[in-house]
Amino acid sequence: MKVRDEQFRAGHPRRRAVWRTWAVVTAVIAAFSLVMTPAVGQSLDPSAFGSATVAADDSATADSGPAAIPGAGVPATVTPRLTGPSGAPLTSTRITGPIRVTSTSYPFGAANHTRVPENLAAIGYVEEEYFVSGLANVYTWPAPGPAVVRTANAPYTTRILVRRPARASAFSGNVVVEPLNPSNLFDLNLGWGLMHEQLIRNGDVWVGVTVKPVSMQTLKTFNPVRYAPLSMNNPLPLDDPRNCATVPADSSRTTENGLAWDIYSQVGQLLRTSASPVHYGGAKAHHALKLYGFGYSQTGGYMYDYINAVAPRVKAETGRSIYDAYIVAVAGGAFAGIYPINQCEALPALGDPRRQFSNVGVPIIHVMSQSDYLRGITARRPDSDVPSDAYRQYEMAGAGHATQTELDFAAAPADIEKGGRAVPPSNCNEGPRSRFPSSIFFDAFLRNLDDWVRRGIAPPHGSPIVVQNGAPVLDRFGNVVGGLRSPYLDVPTSTWYGSSTGPSFCAIAGHEVPFSQALLQQIYPTHTVYVRAVAKDTRALVKQRFITRYDGDRLVREASTAEVP
């Protein structure tokens, strides 16, 4: 079995402790049920926690207050006192887990069950799955400004997938929280796939959240017993006139996509409590906790709804933002730039201020790829270092949107089929999906975002891809001019395209056309000339903080072994 682990054993000296934990066998963590926030704006008083009661029942049938969830292992109950902004008591929701893992029952998309499996234990990480249940509002959003409650307190149960350092001493304090992308009708672990090297080098936690009913249906088909409790049911009966007769093709009138926003808030609130999956049993924290929201493509579009419609409600009701900063990726303008706040509501028109970020109050890094920047061009806006409007805009020259990376870090093909879904193709008419490693940019985005939040060091300013008369300006090799640069375009050996033809998402997969041997010899008379050019370009990009030193070293090593010319 091919396992990605060797590349993580070395790295930044500050984080070498992460690699030394590979031999640690983590203790079995008792499952627990946490009473917490039912809807946006409710808070938890950590001082009110009582002692946990653990029932050693391997069959997982013990009563854990609310009905025990099948497959959850050994339930435990923690009952804190809950208060809202006015101090009034609130109804409760719960988190249960870690859900027990066996050879036949494991999380969909588990690291060791992806297309290219990962051995997290070998790099000092553990993976756990939890179920989160609560009450979520369905919103309407008739005008710019905070959303308005349409239907209150609809019950839900979802799952979160947590990947964290095994030891508290290796935890950086950073938690990246990602609504799992459902565009292929199943959960994609995109943020982990794009940023796992930086996450692991820095000791960060990644939390993936299932946020759409269509993905839940895949989970239930994949493992009906494990995922039986999951639900995002529509609180409106079918005969209610507010339950619209026409819904999106990937949706159903019996479920409600609009529960996603409070689910995302409540997971973030949970992670800030002393019973969080990243609390490490009360071990003294070495770094302040920071939550970073991440959305990619469809879930990048979700970030527009959440940040502009729901986050302001949270801040007004609780006095602070749940998330300390955001990375909003490959979504903007006419390309996945926003999604209906509920499945019956129309989208805001292009040009509507709800489709732009302004004075959010926490830093945002917004990024587009070569596949989508033209359709998303109306999302462009100036950078800002004003604290209330901290913002960076980037466009990744050469990078495809739906590359092979998203498939390699997704559930294994057999598990996708077991979930009742088609396995996305790795090839388009022009050949394999783009191999352009946009991870070199995302690693830097995450590092720079963290520096911005923790140290006040603003990220570098990028330049947009140059557009004239609605089309990109190309260099003599057919590559775009401007945008975030890399040796792949500055010292090219191929022409990089953001769009391909073929089934599934080939239109945004991208591909490359390698140069002929004759052209390579014309550009680079010797291999040494090529390697020196890559090294020079990479040093400049690392110095400007567009690429991390780790990734820069990797690019130079790659060039040194490339058969160029």
Image: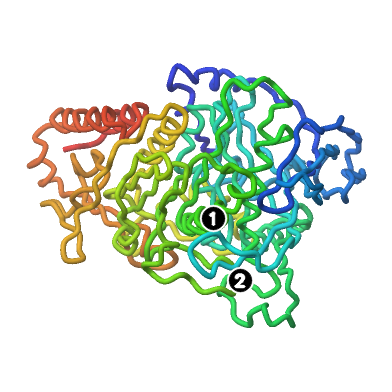
Relative to 430, 221 lies left or right? right
Q: Which mark is residue 251?
A: 2
The answer to whether residue 420 is visible is no
Neighbor class of circle 2 (other Cα within 10 Å; few <14, some 14-19, many 20+) is some
Does 472 sit above or below residue 90? below
Asked whether residue 532 appears in the rendered view, the answer is: yes
Residues marked 2 and 1 touching at CB (< 8 Å): no
Say which element carries label 1.
helix
Question: Disc 2 residue type?
Answer: Ser
* Image quadrant where residue 549 sits: top left
Amino acid carrying label 1: it is Tyr
Please name the residue shown 60% across and 28% down the image: 165
Image side of residue 254 versus residue 409, left or right: right
According to the picture, the residue beneath numbered tag 1 turns out to be 306
498 vs 92: above or below: below
Above-or-below relation of 19 to 456: above
Q: Nearer the viewer, mark 2 or mark 1?
A: 1
Q: Residue at x 79, y 55 (%)?
A: 225
On the image, the x and y values in percent for residue 181 come to 53, 55
